[in-house]
């Protein structure tokens, strides 16, 4: 996401490379290029101008230290201003109540129903809550069915009244049901339209008045750019929503919505959503997003994703096996499974500083691990636990079972041996003790 904006901002900073100090003359071109990059990203011109005027004033007021270059200083100033433009800090999400009621609104096709499922999954798995999903879109039977399927997928109950054509009554009944069944959060998926109309606005406003929600989340397709900002303003004028959700950030996002919504409606972005999988919902952190836009990576989010898959007891056992040079294919497969659970590989690599821009044109096949897993699955339990016993005949059988050539198995075995040798050398230098001091025996 934001690849085009990132490239243009990097190009703008190049004007200051090799400069000994910041002057009004050498900063003028940089600021102009930054403004043009923002407008190209579908940021409103007024917002872009105000933003770059702030950057210019800050840059001219800063003294460049001998330890940093004008270019580095400019990147920091832009990062700080981007962070402020998108809200400054993480927004608070209210999920306490008896029950807490969350109203989800937006246009048809923005991803409201999918987001509702993701939010229920997030509150259940990350916050330990017991959510109830509510199908309040009375116009599209497919929306009710979609929510029911999502509920089954994540193990969350769904309140559906297919014959009831009163969305307000459905929402009120769902809240009563939640109280009776000790559900501590209710997520109401409301109807949308292809464009804003009075009937839709009146209905969702009536639901708000009837159930008094703690959170009203406006879901917006980030690929719609400035149109998304205009729609957000219309919804906010009527609903006074509490936060924004940006969906489809894994698409060809120019960034206009993310950079403009907070400024336009003065409401925080609370979540971002990528793809269709139920675990692809992220809390929005303005500073982390600013770092990613500027190609600075997002190590904090990468570490958090890794920690979600981290099992301390399992890690201790793995470290013990590595120390004894007993790392095997069963361990390797387990590590692959944990990596896959962390999310899209290209997104993960993009969180590493300096990597994002280098892999923007790289087509990373998400099925790349399947061939490796097929070879490991074709091994017997004894072969997985004792890689050294795998001779030529066994390799031929493994290749046949995995639908691979023997050459593929040979190459994989060679790479595995190289990895084991590297682990052995790290062990000799006590690298694992330094990296994981809490696991020393």
Image: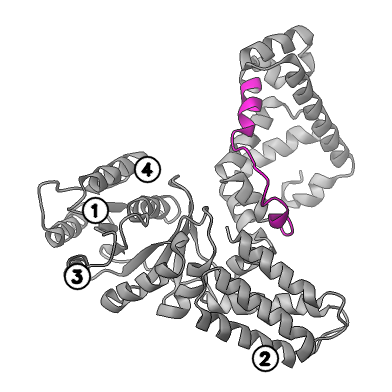
As measured in the structure, the alpha-carbon distance from the residue carrying label 1 to the one carrying label 4 is 14 Å
Q: In this orientation, does residue 165 appear?
A: yes
Read off the magenta span: 352-375
Q: Is residue 413 left or right of residue 161?
A: right
Residue name at image x 38 percent, y 73 percent: 230
Q: Does the residue at mark 1 contact the one at mark 2 (Cβ under 8 Å)?
A: no
The CA span between labels 4 and 2 is 50 Å
Which of the two marks, 1 or 3, is nearer to us in this view?
Answer: 3
N-terminal of the pair, mark 4 or mark 2, is: 2
Please tell me how crowded label 3 is: few (under 14), some (14-19), or many (20+) other residues with Cα within 10 Å: few
Compared to 117, does 230 lie above or below?
below
Most foreground residue, 150 or 14: 14
Residue under the image location 55 percent in, 68 percent down: 41
Nearest to the eye among marks 4 and 2: give it.
2
Q: CA distance from mark 1 to mark 2?
A: 50 Å
Q: Earlier in the sequence, mark 3 or mark 2?
A: 2
Quarter of the picture holding the C terminus: top right
**Picture quadrant where residue 177 is located:** bottom left
Judging by the rendered image, the residue that carries numbered circle 2 is 57
> In the drawing, what numbered circle is on residue 255?
none
Disc 2, SS:
helix
**Residue located beneath label 4 in the image:** 154
Is residue 95 something that shows in the picture?
no
Q: Secondary structure at mark 1?
A: strand
Task: Look at the picture and state if 30 lies above or below 304.
Answer: below
Q: Mark 1 or 4 closer to N-term?
A: 1
């Amino acid at each position: 996401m934001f690849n085009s904006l990132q490239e243009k901002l990097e190009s703008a900073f190049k004007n200051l490379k090799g400069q000994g100090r910041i002057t009004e003359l050498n900063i003028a071109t940089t600021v102009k290029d930054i403004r043009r990059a923002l407008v190209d990203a579908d940021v409103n011109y007024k917002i872009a101008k105000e933003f770059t005027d702030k950057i210019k004033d800050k840059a001219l007021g800063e003294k460049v230290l001998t330890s940093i270059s004008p270019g580095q200083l400019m990147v920091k100033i832009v990062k700080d201003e981007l962070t402020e433009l998108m809200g400054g800090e993480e927004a608070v999400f209210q999920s306490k109540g008896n029950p807490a009621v969350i109203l989800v609104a937006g246009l048809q096709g923005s991803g409201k129903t999918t987001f509702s499922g993701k939010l229920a999954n997030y509150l259940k798995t990350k916050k330990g809550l017991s959510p109830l999903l509510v199908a309040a879109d009375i116009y599209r039977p497919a929306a009710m069915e979609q929510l029911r399927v999502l509920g089954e997928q994540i193990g969350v109950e769904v309140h559906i009244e297919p014959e009831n054509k009163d969305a307000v009554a459905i929402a009120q009944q769902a809240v009563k049901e939640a109280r009776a069944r000790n559900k501590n959060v209710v997520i109401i998926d409301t109807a949308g339209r292809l464009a804003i109309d009075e009937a839709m606005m009146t209905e969702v406003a009536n639901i708000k008045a009837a159930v008094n929600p703690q959170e009203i989340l406006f879901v917006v397709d980030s690929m719609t750019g400035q149109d998304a900002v205009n729609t957000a303003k219309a919804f906010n004028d009527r609903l006074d929503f509490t936060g924004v959700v940006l969906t489809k950030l894994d698409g060809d996002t120019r960034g206009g919505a993310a950079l403009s919504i907070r400024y336009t409606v003065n409401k925080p972005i609370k979540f971002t959503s990528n793809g269709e999988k139920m675990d692809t919902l992220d809390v929005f952190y303005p500073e982390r997003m600013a770092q990613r836009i500027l190609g600075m990576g997002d190590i904090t989010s990468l570490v958090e994703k890794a920690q979600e898959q981290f099992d301390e007891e399992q890690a201790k056992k793995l470290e013990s096996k590595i120390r004894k040079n007993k790392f095997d294919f069963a361990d390797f497969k387990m590590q692959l499974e944990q990596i896959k659970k962390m999310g899209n590989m290209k997104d993960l690599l993009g969180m590493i500083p300096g990597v994002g821009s280098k892999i923007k044109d790289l087509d990373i096949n998400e099925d790349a691990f399947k061939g490796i897993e097929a070879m490991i699955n074709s091994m017997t339990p004894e072969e997985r636990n004792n890689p050294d016993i795998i001779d030529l005949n066994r390799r031929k059988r493994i290749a046949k079972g995995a639908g691979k050539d023997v050459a593929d198995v040979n190459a994989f075995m060679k790479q595995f041996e190289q990895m084991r040798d590297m682990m052995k050398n790290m062990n000799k230098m006590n690298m694992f003790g330094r990296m994981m001091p809490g696991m020393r025996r």
